[in-house]
Amino acid sequence: MLRLIDGDDTAASSLSVAALDEFIRMGESRVVSDFRSSLMMQGFAATPINGQIGLPDDLLELCVIHQDGRRLEFVGHERLNESEKFCTQLGNNLLVSGTGPVSITYYARPADLITVLHPTFMRHRELYLYATVLSAAMHMGLPQLDVWTAAYATQLQQAKRMERLAVTNGTPLRIRSR
């Protein structure tokens, strides 16, 4: 990363390790805000207590919620009691009108890169790299800001395309007889 910011003369860099760590954290935050990967999907099951289920701390976005074998629909809090097919999020709780067990699929925030190189990072390293360099460029006032913004946008589009293909699994399978 130093080579992208400072060029070939990394020995003369004035960036400290703490500053680099902070740029990496800012880049991570940018990726987590802009991007969802199938590798980030998690699931759990719970039984509502008084119509509430506590949501996990690592929740970024709810995907699919099922109760008693039927998919629940997100509605505003005021419509929750109109049907047992409805649910709503209120703070760190999911509110449901039914009483049966609930299965939830959600996007989870990956662990910080400072602790582990998680699968989302391993699949999309360039996205994280350009997010980090873009964060550094923005905070340091580097003249290449437009270059890094465009590079990050390109990597983001490529990562989203790769995720779409991973979810759809490409073309249908074909069986050939021998």
Image (cartoon, rainbow, N blue to C red):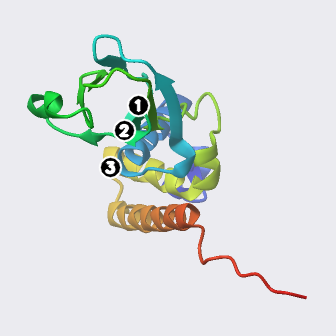
Say above or below: 62 vs 127. Answer: above
Q: Which residue is mark 3?
A: 138
Say above or below: 57 vs 13. Answer: above
Question: Dot 1: within a 10 Å radius of its alpha carbon, few (fewer than 14), some, or many (20 or more) residues?
Answer: some
Residue 30 visible somewhere in the drawing: yes
Q: Position of residue 112 (x, y in %)?
A: 53, 31
Q: Position of residue 156 (x, y in %)?
A: 43, 61
**In-image side of 8 versus 6 (left or right):** right
| Comparing labels 3 and 2, the label whose residue is closer to the camera | 2
Residue 13 visible somewhere in the drawing: no
* Mark drawn on residue 59: 1
Question: Dot 3: within a 10 Å radius of its alpha carbon, few (fewer than 14), some, or many (20 or more) residues?
Answer: some
**In-image side of 55 versus 176 (left or right):** left
* Mark drawn on residue 62: 2
**Are circles 2 and 1 on residues that touch, CB within 8 Å?**
yes
Q: Quadrant of residue 154?
A: bottom left
Residue at the image position 36 percent from the left and 39 percent from the top: 61
